[in-house]
Amino acid sequence: MNVLDVLDKDLVKVPLLSSDKHGIIVELVDTLVDARGYSPAQGDQILDAVLARESLGSTGIGNGIAIPHAKSDVIDQVTMVLGISRLPIDFDSPDGEMSRIFFLVLAPTKQASAHVELLASIARSCTSKIFRRLLEQARDSEEVVHLFME
Amino acid sequence: MGVPFKQIVVYVDGSESSMTAMMYAIKLAKEHEASLTAVYVINTRALSELVKAGIFVAVERDEYQRDLALDADRYLNHACRLAEQKDVEIETVKLEGTVHVVVKELLKEKGADLLVLGGITDIRSRREELASETDRMMRTAPCPVLVVRDDDDIWYEFEA
């Protein structure tokens, strides 16, 4: 599994409007809940799982990217929400750099293989500085999808 | 050249398409009276990449490695049940490492004359880093590769 297998225009939000780490995570989860029609209770379960993972250590990985993620059986298949923020957000990244590109990755507990492959694919796909800059400057979700498909 | 096939290897990763490939491989092995091996690879390379990139903390890597081992057992057991349904003998192999590398080694070791894969996706990007493990296996296999489309007909026919 790779980024292209799960990239969905309805699960891309540009720009994110929140101005802090918690708000960004909530906004990404809300994007998923709205697009997939989950109930508020299901949304809360997903959010709790993501925040529980975040409590183990920040998922800000440096170079302006954060990849909050969690296992959750609320969802039935590996899912990715991608958001771009115009504001630099402090995500406690190890390099001290603020983040603008956010990938929320969720997977059912019994799809560990696909989950791991997707996370690794995201890490590989964002190694290019030029690509990261293009993503940060994308005007809308269509442009984000187009950048990955090029 | 091994025609008809004598040593078939099928790659299983838990995806629906790999299970379709599994069914196809079982039927193929029965028709050709071939030996059949199902392989699952615990992708420890991806786990290492995730720790190196700072995406996984150490405790999380250990947890996912256990999850992957459980996945391997679950899907390989399922492969055995499917093969049993069709009275086909099957060997299951659980490996760890970089998927396409260890599968290539297994194919050589077994003297495989066919690798069966599911889950080949359309080419949607020119970027090499977006190639999937299945794509890489297809490119690097030292034997012929059969790609099974994820088709409901295969499931119906298998269950019939």
Image (spheres, grey):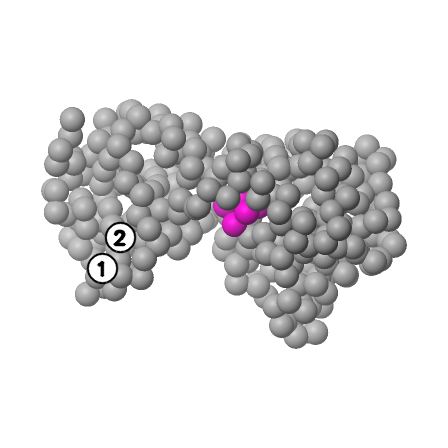
Please say whether residue A86 is visible from this viewpoint: yes
Q: Where is residue B1, by image quadrant? A: top left
Letter of the chain that mark 2 sits on in the rendering: B
Query: Over which residues does the magenta segment extend?
Result: A1-5
Of residues B58 and B107, the one drawn nearer to the viewer in this rendering: B107
Q: Residues within 10 Å of mark 2 (few under 14, many from 20)?
A: many
Residue type at mark 2 is Met
Q: Residue at x 55, y 52 (%)?
A: A6
**Residue indicated by mark 2:** B23
Judge from the rendering whether residue A118 lies leftward or rightward of residue B78; answer left or right: right
Residue at position x 58%, y 40% from top? A150
Q: Real-space Cα distance between discs 1 and 2?
A: 7 Å
In the picture of the structure, the residue carrying the numbered disc 1 is B158
| Spot occupied by residue B15 in the image (x, y as percentages of width and height) | 42, 52
Residue drawn at x 70%, y 63% is: A31
Say the numbered circle drawn on residue B75: none
Q: Is residue A2 magenta?
A: yes
Label 1 packing within 10 angstroms: few (<14), some (14-19), many (20+): some
Which residue is at the front of the view, A50 or A142? A142
CB atoms of marks 1 and 2 within 8 Å? yes
Pinpoint residue B144: horizontal percent, then vertical percent: 26, 32
Q: Tell me if residue A37 comes above or below residue A79 in the rendering.
A: below
Q: Is residue A50 left or right of residue B8?
A: right
Q: Main secondary structure of the magenta part?
A: helix
Please give the name of the residue rendered at 57% of the width and 44% of the height, measured from the top-left corner: A149
- In this picture, residue B97 sits left or right of residue B110: right
Residue type, label 1: Phe
As for residue B145 lying within the magenta part, the answer is no
Give left or right: position of A50 versus B93.
Answer: right
